[in-house]
Amino acid sequence: MRMLHTMLRVGDLDRSIAFYTNVMGMQLLRQSENEAYKYTLAFVGYGDEANHTVLELTYNWGVDKYEMGGAYGHIAIGVEDIYATCDRIKAAGGEVYREPGPVKGGNTVIAFVRDPDGYAIELIERK
């Protein structure tokens, strides 16, 4: 078994695709529309779906905002140089709301980014 994807509901599909591709460095892998049920899916990731876990961005036509709820935590992405990654994200217009530094009570260096819909993304330095 392996994880295939995580689905996020987004309020503006083009804005979310731009964020995940231009700011986070992912690739748009595929996109499809379902006219009967009024939704569009876009799959983004760092590699093909056959070998990598990806994000499914779901746009339900006409819905531009969702409540986050209290159960959602974050998506985690491993990076080699967290300081350079955060600088690149900020330069591309992304929001780094927790600057790089050690996790409380440990040595692992982490940072947090927020996507356009408010979803949290944890960056974890993995050299």
Image (cartoon, grey):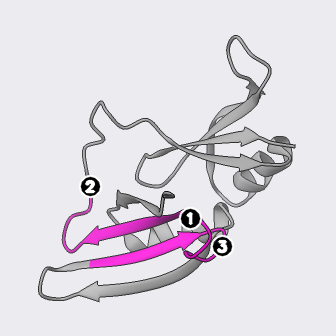
Image: magenta residue range: 40-65
Quadrant in the rendering for residue 125: top right
Instruction: Using a 10 Å C-alpha cutoff, classify the residue at mark 2 as few (fewer than 14 neighbours), some (14 to 19) or many (20 or more).
Output: few
Q: Is residue 125 left or right of residue 43?
A: right
Residue type at numbered disc 2: Lys
Q: Position of residue 10 (x, y in %)?
A: 35, 62
Residue at image location 25% in from the left, 43% down from the top = 67
The extreme top residue here reads 105
Q: Position of residue 15 (x, y in %)?
A: 46, 69
Give the Cα separation between the discs numbered 3 and 1: 17 Å
Residue at the spot of label 3: 47
Q: Is residue 20 magenta?
A: no
Residue at the spot of label 2: 65
Q: Nearer the viewer, residue 98 or 49?
A: 49
Instruction: Using a 10 Å C-alpha cutoff, classify the residue at mark 3 as few (fewer than 14 neighbours), some (14 to 19) or many (20 or more).
Output: some
Please report whichever mark, 3 or 1, sits nearer to the chain's N-terminal start.
Answer: 1
Give the Cα separation between the discs numbered 3 and 2: 28 Å
Please report whichever mark, 1 or 2, sits nearer to the chain's N-terminal start.
Answer: 1
Q: Position of residue 58 (x, y in %)?
A: 33, 68
The extreme front residue here reads 1
Residue at the spot of label 1: 19
Residue type at numbered disc 1: Phe
- Give the structural element (helix, strand or loop) at label 2: loop
Q: Is residue 47 left or right of residue 108?
A: left
